[in-house]
Image: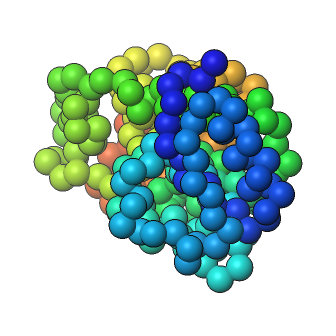
Amino acid sequence: MLFHSGLFLILSSIPCALHRIIIFVVYYKHIVTGYTAAKQVPLNQLNRYDLIILDIMMPGTDGFSFCEKIRGLVDCPIVFLTAKTMENDITFGLGLGADDYLTKPFRIAELRARITAHLRREQRERHSSLTFERIKIDLAAKEVKIDGITLPFTKSEYLICEYLARNRGQVFSREQIYEAVFSLDGDSDNSTIATHIKNIRAKLSGLNIQPITTVWGIGYKWE
């Protein structure tokens, strides 16, 4: 069973793909609104949704542009559906604020696992904070601050930092981080982790601090 029922927004220009996802989501007792174009989506209703699934390739406003437009309006997870596999496309999409992506064609079981994981992590409660010299991680606000300045991390970037910081000094593979953060089997598309960490480092590059180090051939750790 999925972790809990939710209200989803699904946007895909391919009617058969949209219909297939809607059937699956409704089967598991979720409520879903589907559109075939970004211009159809009422922006004043976006805060209703627990999760948004966006197809990247759409006529008019594509998934990238729509994600960039709405990311500041919603706090729920955004998952891309894409036929693109180039690293730059994935990096670009996650950098816009998306939390995850699925490469088409995907298995329904994989979509189910992603949805379950994202809904589960949305329900996790945060308490207190973690402090490492210049770095403060506010577990309640889900923010990372350097010298009091809040960094513009996406939700996934924040969760990766939190997980590594909670386990400071321990080395984790991409598979282990993916499973811990997204609550999924490590055999899933864990290259997402490498992309998120690349984006985290880019946002820290001007602050002369890099708490996440690479242990070559093994994974990553928080220093």
Residue 127, position in %: x, y?
22, 22
Q: Quadrant of the N terminus?
A: top right
| 102 relative position to 92: left or right | right
Q: Residue furthest bottom?
A: 60
Q: Position of residue 162 (x, y in %)?
A: 37, 30
In the image, is residue 48 above or below residue 110? Answer: below
Is 179 placed above or below 193 here? Answer: above
In the image, 209 versus 162, the foreground residue is: 162
Task: Say which quadrant the C terminus sits in.
Answer: top left
What is the count of numbered marks? 0
What residue appears at the point 51 percent right and 30 percent down from the top-left corner?
5
Q: Indicate the quadrant where residue 60 lies.
A: bottom right
Q: Which residue is at a point 40% across and 17% down the rendered structure image?
A: 167
| Residue 122 vs residue 207, the one in the foreground | 122
Residue at point 62% right, 58% down? Answer: 34
Q: Position of residue 188 (x, y in %)?
A: 73, 31
Determine if residue 175 is in view.
no
Locate residue 191: give its quadrant.
top right
